[in-house]
Amino acid sequence: MRRAGSRLAPWRPWHRVHSGRARQDRSGSCKLKGNSVSYKQCLIALNLLLAGVACAQDHPGVDAFVSRATSEHGMDAEQVAALLAGAEFKQSIVDAISRPAEGKPWHQYRPIFITDKRIEEGVDFWNEHAELLAQVAEKYQVDPQVVVAIIGVETFYGRITGSYRVLDALATLSFHYPKDLKSDRSGFFSNELMEFLLLGREEDLPLNEVTGSYAGAMGMGQFIPSSYRAYAVDVDGDGARDLWRSVDDVVGSVANYLHVHGWEPGGPVTRRAVPAANADLSLLEVRDYTPRKSVMELHDQGFHSAADLMPDRQAALLELEEADAPSLWLTFQNFYVITRYNRSPLYAMAVYQLSEAILAARDGA
Ligand SMILES: [Ca+2]
């Protein structure tokens, strides 16, 4: 591997998934690399061509991207162009971004993440790394169960970190973002692609080998490149921020992420709300999880909650789609912080409920 002089073991999750990869030659057409090409691979390649699907190099946005990499970041134009020429369009990435789990109602989303197995493995992960989690929780002023739960939801405690090449994921979503979705996020992914190149330069990563999710999230905590650059920390002190192989770095980086975004140690995350007859249900349409109203103010607007909450604590409202009637919740600063990790309120609620289940299981053990 390219980490010359590194004391680290070879990069475990960076493996080539396919032996006969679709590649692009200098003429700009897609071809399959290698001498042995199966009938199935021929069919796939033919289908791609018939569908008019271009590799990254064919897209007019590529030249602009290379120019920006050169002018804004001093990168070598030929090297960037060569890297992008090796990026592969993946229909599976387009399909995955078109139907995220967050599109499901809560009562279908919750069972994906809140399972006995994920709770038990969370307790095991915590016990195995108890000293580390205690140190990191103290240093970054976070609650350890939430750090464990995020790693549990993201990658099942590091077991499933994604097998897409990050280069393919980010190039596909930068240059071939599906046009039939509600919003065009190609600009976001183009920015992440640039951040990926910058991260590679800073951390000496082999960019054409690094693997991650279909959206380019990497390692045990699934950090997108901009987050990796901004919030990852080197806890084990080897000089590298390694979110694939160093549990110390992963736990510290997730904790740092929460800390920087304003985690309140020991603070509430969310509580059930009970609507009174006069509840202003139009407030549920806001879908803004920044806490902007006090518990008392929301009480006066018809959303009653537990008596132990400070009346001046700032909160927001959340409605979740259950199998029967919807459930209502007050959400607080810590809930908002989890939504900085992933904007979906379903994600934040799943992390919170998993964290509580892990905490209860560990305390009961
Ligand atoms: Ca490290």
Image (spheres, rainbow, N blue to C red):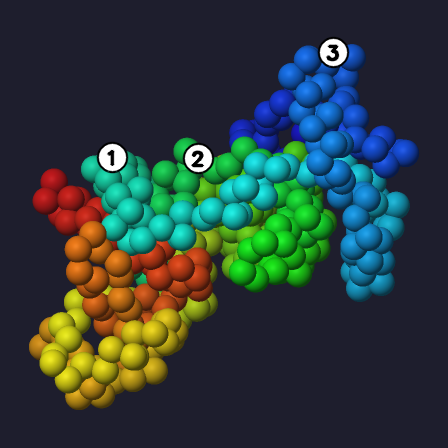
Identify the residue under disc 2.
160
**Mark in the foreground, 3 or 2:** 3
Q: Earlier in the sequence, mark 1 or mark 3?
A: 3
Q: Earlier in the sequence, mark 1 or mark 2?
A: 1
> Circle 1: is it few (<14), some (14-19), or many (20+) Cα within 10 Å?
few
Give percent across and percent down for residue 357. 19, 49
Q: Quadrant of the C terminus?
A: top left
Element on which disc 2 rests = loop
Identify the residue under disc 3.
36
Element on which disc 1 rests = helix
Q: Are marks 1 and 2 in contact (CB under 8 Å)?
A: no
Element on which disc 3 rests = loop
Front-most of 88 and 197? 88
Q: Is residue 245 above or below residue 309?
A: above
Identify the residue under disc 1.
117
| Outermost residue toward the front in this view | 50
- What amino acid type is highlighted by mark number 1? Lys
